[in-house]
Image: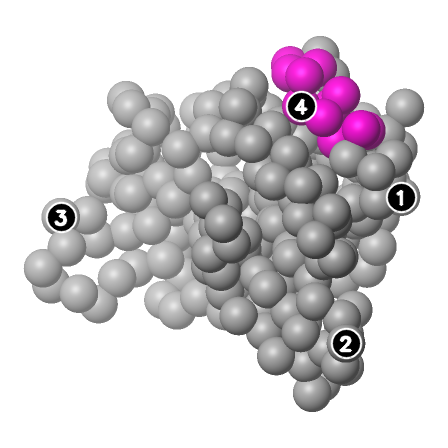
Amino acid sequence: MKYKNIIKAKFVSRPNRFIAYVDIDGKQEIAHVKNTGRCKELLIPKTTVFLSESDNPERKTKYDLITVKKNSFLINMDSQAPNAAVEEWLKNGNLFSKKASIKREYSYNKSRFDFYVEDGKRKVFIEVKGVTLEKDNIAYFPDAPTERGIKHILELEASLNEGYEAIILFVIQMEKVNKFKPNDETHKAFGDALRKASKAGVKVLAMNCLITPDSMVINKPVKVELY
């Protein structure tokens, strides 16, 4: 997936979850932050960030903050990017055939999964989680407690009983990682639910991404270490 009208800036501050102050060539501007997570390890004053400039004159904020530079590599922090990238990736014949039927935001019982795929006799639910937290070349999820995340895992596990396949796909929004692990230090209950679901038959996958200031493309599998 690609963005338009990319501008380089410096991060200044984040007064709330939704906006950030940034410095563009010495002028302070307001940017919409496309990620309501904490991201404290990413949004550090004077850090280089990349913004997408909107061409919609009706918008309150002219810019979206989408990518941040951490050390020598880039991390995409747009929470909408993983699903868009996964849709492109699936339609290119990854995981399934190019003839597969791929539907987004699919309702099932009381659940809504990110993707529902039919490929021949296979019927598969996929839940996507974007990952922006990295420590020592290891990617972790979540970066904050997530009861909603646990709910999604339990719903995927329950779907197995009715003959569906179920996948939870962690999209690591950076390239420079060696493995993925659940963040037990932050939310052990999520890790426990993920391990239980894996034992029950839910497939746990992690993919890293190639990141540029104006794009994010799913790249290759990353080792998943649940224990």
Mark 3: secondary structure = loop
- Which stretch appears magenta? 186-196
Q: CA distance from mark 3 to mark 1?
A: 41 Å
Query: What residue would you read off at disc 4?
Result: 190
Name the foreground residue: 125 vs 81. 125
Q: Is residue 219 above or below residue 110?
A: below
> What label does residue 60 carry, if any?
3
**Which of the two discs, 1 and 2, sits closer to the camera?**
2
Q: Residue at x 49, y 49 (%)?
A: 109
| Percent position of residue 208, x then y | 74, 52
Q: Residue at x 81, y 48 (%)?
A: 203
User: Considering only order in the chain, which callout, 4 or 2, is on the residue closer to the N terminus?
Assistant: 2
> What label does residue 121 carry, if any?
2
Q: Amino acid at mark 2?
A: Lys
151 inside magenta stretch: no
Secondary structure that dominates the magenta span: helix
Mark 2: secondary structure = loop
Mark 1: secondary structure = strand
Q: Residues within 10 Å of mark 2 (few under 14, many from 20)?
A: few
Q: State if disc 2 and disc 1 touch (CB < 8 Å).
A: no
| Percent position of residue 94, x then y | 76, 72
Query: What residue would you read off at disc 1?
Result: 223
User: Considering only order in the chain, which callout, 2 or 1, is on the residue closer to the N terminus?
Assistant: 2
**Which of the two discs, 3 and 1, sits closer to the camera?**
1
Q: State if disc 4 and disc 2 touch (CB < 8 Å).
A: no
How many discs appear?
A: 4
Q: Amino acid at mark 3?
A: Lys
Q: Is residue 178 above or below residue 15?
A: below
